[in-house]
Image (tube, rainbow, N blue to C red):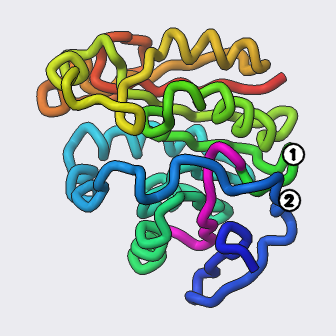
């Protein structure tokens, strides 16, 4: 059985997720886990006030069956026991299981989601867009739209390129680590049928450590911007 079609249950065993898995349409997709930035300190970083505030703010938007795309160690996966956590990095999913944050995990790519159409009520895509090559963003948005139910919800966060945080790191960005405009993202999601956007912004001065609160407003120059959208 391919890795991408295997899930860990809460007891650490293996089982097939027959309710949501679809036949693969070719390869898992790119990038591979070897291409991604080093996330070894991510667990520590997410203890900062900005990240803790985002977790609290997102909680109220999660309902029904949930897919956490780019779940890492399951920071948002733990918001619902129904969550299926997907990531390219097997070791991060294992870490999430050990922490008790992940119940069902699938190794796979956001560019070729191994699920049937209209499988999930809520799609969480928190901070994954900036780790997908720019040329593959349309494919990524098509995939998360495909697996969302007809009246599904999308919660998606990006690092804003207009933030001071992004501007100070211009030389660090590459194809697998880059900011992405929340305004451009909004336009692309609207073309795919996502409507009624609600906005949350974290780090309103554009950095992580100063005024890290999450506010219910669209602030393009904030450190990160979350959009909540529904499908008609």
Residue at (51, 26) in percent of width and height: 134
Q: Secondary structure at mark 1?
A: loop
Specify whether residue 15 is painted magenta: no
Above or below residue 199? Residue 115 is below
What residue would you read off at disc 1?
Answer: 117
Q: In this orientation, which residue lies closer to the viewer: 2 or 118?
A: 2
Specify whether residue 105 is painted magenta: yes
Residue at (42, 80) in percent of width and height: 98
Between disc 1 and disc 2, the foreground one is 2
Q: Residues within 10 Å of mark 1 (few under 14, many from 20)?
A: some
Residue at (64, 81) in percent of width and height: 9
How many circles with numbers are drawn on the protein?
2
Residue at (64, 35) in percent of width and height: 140
Q: Which residues are magenta?
A: 102-112
Residue 15, image x, y percentages: 73, 83
Dividing the image into 4 quarters, which one contains the N terminus?
A: bottom right
Corner quadrant of residue 171 = top left
Above or below residue 85? Residue 181 is above
Dividing the image into 4 quarters, which one contains the C terminus?
A: top right
| Circles 1, 2 touching at the beta carbon (< 8 Å) | yes
Picture disc at residue 193: none
Cα separation between marks 1 and 2: 8 Å
Q: Is residue 65 left or right of residue 105?
A: right
Q: Considering the whole magenta stretch, tell me its main secondary structure.
A: loop
What residue would you read off at disc 2?
Answer: 22
Residue 82, image x, y percentages: 68, 62
Q: In this orientation, which residue lies closer to the viewer: 150 or 69?
A: 69
Q: Earlier in the sequence, mark 1 or mark 2?
A: 2
Residue 108, image x, y percentages: 62, 59
Residue 60, image x, y percentages: 55, 41
Q: Secondary structure at mark 2?
A: loop
Above or below residue 147? Residue 25 is below
């Amino acid at each position: 059985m391919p890795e991408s079609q295997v899930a860990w249950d809460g007891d650490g065993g293996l089982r097939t997720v027959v309710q949501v898995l679809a036949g693969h349409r070719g390869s898992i997709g790119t990038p591979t886990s070897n291409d991604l930035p080093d996330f070894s300190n991510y667990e520590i970083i997410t203890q900062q006030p900005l990240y803790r505030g985002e977790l609290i703010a997102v909680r109220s938007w999660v309902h029904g069956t949930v897919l956490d795309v780019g779940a890492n160690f399951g920071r948002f996966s733990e918001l619902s026991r129904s969550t299926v956590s997907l990531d390219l990095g097997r070791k991060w999913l294992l870490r999430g299981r050990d922490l008790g944050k992940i119940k069902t995990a699938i190794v796979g790519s956001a560019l070729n989601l191994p699920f049937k159409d209209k499988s999930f009520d809520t799609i969480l895509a928190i901070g994954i867009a900036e780790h997908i090559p720019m040329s593959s963003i349309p494919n990524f948005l098509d995939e998360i739209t495909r697996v969302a139910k007809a009246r599904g919800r999308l919660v998606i966060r990006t690092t804003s390129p207009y933030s001071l945080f992004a501007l100070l790191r211009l030389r660090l960005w590459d194809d697998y680590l880059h900011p992405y405009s929340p305004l451009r993202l909004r336009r692309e999601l609207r073309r795919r049928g996502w409507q009624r956007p609600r906005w949350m912004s974290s780090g309103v001065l554009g950095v992580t450590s100063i005024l890290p609160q999450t506010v219910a407003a669209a602030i393009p120059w904030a450190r990160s911007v979350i959009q909540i959208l529904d499908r008609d």
